[in-house]
Image: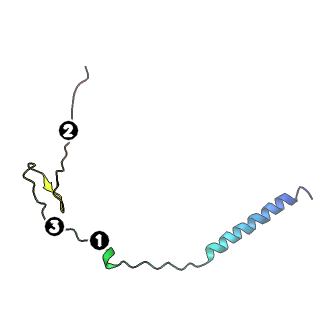
Amino acid sequence: MRFIFPPIVSVALSVILISAAQAQQAEPRKPRPRPQAHPQDRPLKPSRAQPAACPEFGPGFVRMPGSSSCIRFGGGVGIDVGAVP
């Protein structure tokens, strides 16, 4: 009887845990209501105004809106081809 008791207990415990998990999944869940967005939370419409130029810095510089600073965005791509001696 001593050798049969641990396997029986483990099988019974497994059956209880599996049935409890299945019962929990079978309960119908109510969907949570979606929160409503307030008008002040909605994204702003992008402005189509052209940025002001900064002639004192040169071509390509634009004035940042709401400040006296100027900035220029740029970049480039280059490829070098050569032979190893």
Left or right for 79, reference 32: left
- Which amino acid lies under the numbered mark 2 shown in the image of this protein? Gly
Q: Position of residue 30 (x, y in %)?
A: 54, 80
Q: Residue furthest left?
A: 55
Are circles 2 and 1 on residues that touch, CB within 8 Å? no
Q: Residue 37 or 9: which is nearer the viewer?
A: 37
34 on left or right of 44: right
Amino acid type, mark 3: Arg
Q: Is residue 16 above or below residue 71?
A: below
Location of the C terminus by quadrant is top left
Q: Which mark is residue 43?
A: 1
Write down the residue under mark 2.
78
Q: Most extreme residue toward the right, as rendered?
A: 1
Q: How much space separates mark 2 and mark 1, taking CA atoms?
A: 38 Å
Q: In the image, is residue 21 above or below residue 4? A: below
Q: Which quadrant does the N terminus fall into?
A: bottom right
Q: Whole-Å distance between the Cαs marked 3 and 1?
A: 15 Å
Mark 2 crowd level (few <14, some 14–19, many ≥20, 10 Å Cα): few
Relative image position of residue 59 (x, y in whole percent): 8, 49
State the SS at label 3.
Answer: loop
Q: Residue at x 7, y 52 (%)?
A: 55
For marks 3 and 1 on the same chain, the one whose residue lies earlier in the sequence: 1
Judging by the rendered image, the residue that carries numbered circle 3 is 48
